[in-house]
Image (tube, rainbow, N blue to C red):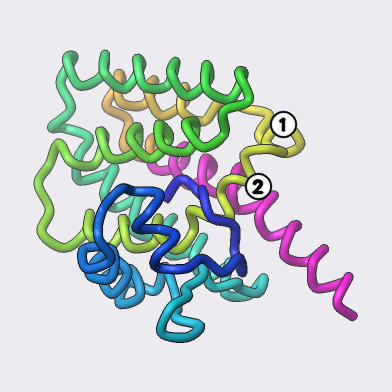
Amino acid sequence: MSGRFPPGLPVTISGLSDSLGVSTMPVRGAIDQLIADGALEYLDNRRVRVPDIDADRFDELIATRIALETVAAERALHFIDYVRLDKLIYLDNLIGAAYESGDFELGIERNFAFHRCMYEVRPSFVLLPLIESVWLRMGPFMREATANLGQSYLIDRHAEAIEAIRTKDVLALKQAIAADIQDGAGHVGRQRLLNAASHRV
């Protein structure tokens, strides 16, 4: 999810097992699950990679995130107490600190933690797993998007979401979540894909 492996870069199963300090068997099991989730693809029996995607498919992932996460936020809103709100504020501060230090991988992890902290307060057997499967597909593109976040992310949408939670304003919360997804990874990630496509022409 954090984008440690860029799209299109082949990695070997043995290399992954060595870096994790485990045998190839659990690595193969994890890889099979990630392939089933669409987060990885096999190149041959020894190598895998994060699949590259085009701008249209990326747009579909962004639209799916917005559709699912605005529903999840709406469902969770009235279950978020002051303790959970304080945790969201704390996580948002950690996100800012990670990005300011240039640790984009950590920033992405904390960003997903912020969203998960909000949605998981109301248990879901379907919605949150679906959201996490989309995160898995988007993670590799999030790293590049966050590295250029200042170009499009001019308003702190997490702060807007926190204020909407504080006032129990469901419409404002859904708008903040949608804008957070679109202004950040949506805009910059799509531009990256369009630029890459133009270079191939």
- Image side of residue 40 versus residue 114, left or right: right
Dominant SS of magenta comes to helix
Q: Position of residue 136 (x, y in %)?
A: 39, 59
Which of the pair 148/2 is nearer the observer?
2
Farthest residue, direction bottom: 44
- The amino acid sitting under disc 1 is Gly
- Residue 144 disc label: 2
- Residue 75 disc label: none
> Callout 2 environment at 10 Å: few (<14), some (14 to 19), or many (20+)?
some
Give the secondary structure at mark 2.
Answer: helix
Q: For the point 65% across and 74% down, which residue is it? A: 54
Bounds of the magenta span?
Answer: 174-201
Q: Quadrant of residue 66?
A: bottom left
Rendered position, 198 above or below 101: below
Give the secondary structure at mark 1.
Answer: helix
Which of the pair 201/58 is nearer the observer?
201
> Callout 1 environment at 10 Å: few (<14), some (14 to 19), or many (20+)?
few
Q: Would you say residue 152 sits in the magenta stretch?
A: no
Q: Position of residue 27 (x, y in %)?
A: 28, 63
Q: Are the residues tagged 2 and 1 within 8 Å (C-beta)?
A: no
- Residue 150 disc label: 1
User: Number of callouts in the render?
Assistant: 2
- The amino acid sitting under disc 2 is Glu
